[in-house]
Amino acid sequence: MGDARFWLFKCEPTAQSIDDLAAMEDQKVAWFGVRNYQARNYMRDSMQQGDLGFYYHSACPQPGIVGMVRVASKPYPDPTQFDPSSPYFDPKASQALPRWILVDVQFVKKTELLSLAQLRAHPNLASMHILQRGSRLSITPVSQDEWQIITPLLHQTDV
């Protein structure tokens, strides 16, 4: 996976929508709260500053890709793991041995919704992680071929 350069970041729009990200100072946010080892490993071991990703709204009436983002930092410890008042607190984590890692994600552009159904309509995307039954990871790699198929389907909108 070391050569993966494209990603899909899933987020519930009620937690943080593409519009929320676009409105933030510096249009950047720490991708905190990931508590899945595979997703953590993608951030820790494979992501590089400058990598591009799709921003995907999940667990909503119309799930799908709604924009593009860029990885804007190197991986670093997720501070929520050390905060007892956080829902992401992990009592097994320590400053010396953090268990959870994050990266900063920066807004690139908002696009019209590219729905799950529209993604499924492309046979060449059949192996894409987000289209697999039971896919629950909040971060998944996107192959260069998948990126090249999806990118022209995205139509930019005004924020």
Image: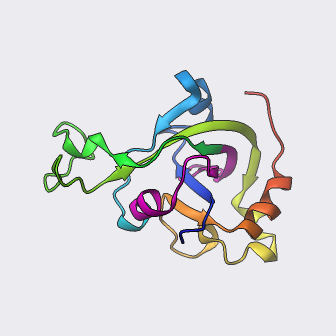
Residue 57, x across and y down, in percent: 59, 48
Q: Considering depth in this image, is 138 or 102 the residue closer to the camera?
A: 102
Asked whether residue 60 is drawn in magenta, I would say yes
Question: In which quadrant will I find the C terminus?
Answer: top right
Residue 80, x across and y down, in percent: 27, 41
Q: Is residue 38 visible?
A: yes
- At horizontal 38% and vertical 53% (from top left) the residue drawn is 34
Note whether 84 is above or below 101 in the view shown: above
Residue 77, x across and y down, in percent: 31, 47
Question: In which quadrant will I find the N terminus?
Answer: bottom right
- At horizontal 69% and vertical 61% (from top left) the residue drawn is 116
Residue 145, x across and y down, in percent: 77, 69
Q: Which residues are magenta?
A: 40-68
Q: What colour scheme was applied to this rendering of the protein?
A: rainbow
**Horizontal side, residue 112 vs residue 94: left or right:** right
Asked whether residue 92 is drawn in magenta, I would say no
Q: Is residue 33 visible?
A: no
- At horizontal 51% and vertical 73% (from top left) the residue drawn is 134
- At horizontal 63% and vertical 60% (from top left) the residue drawn is 5
**Horizontal side, residue 67 vs residue 156: left or right:** left
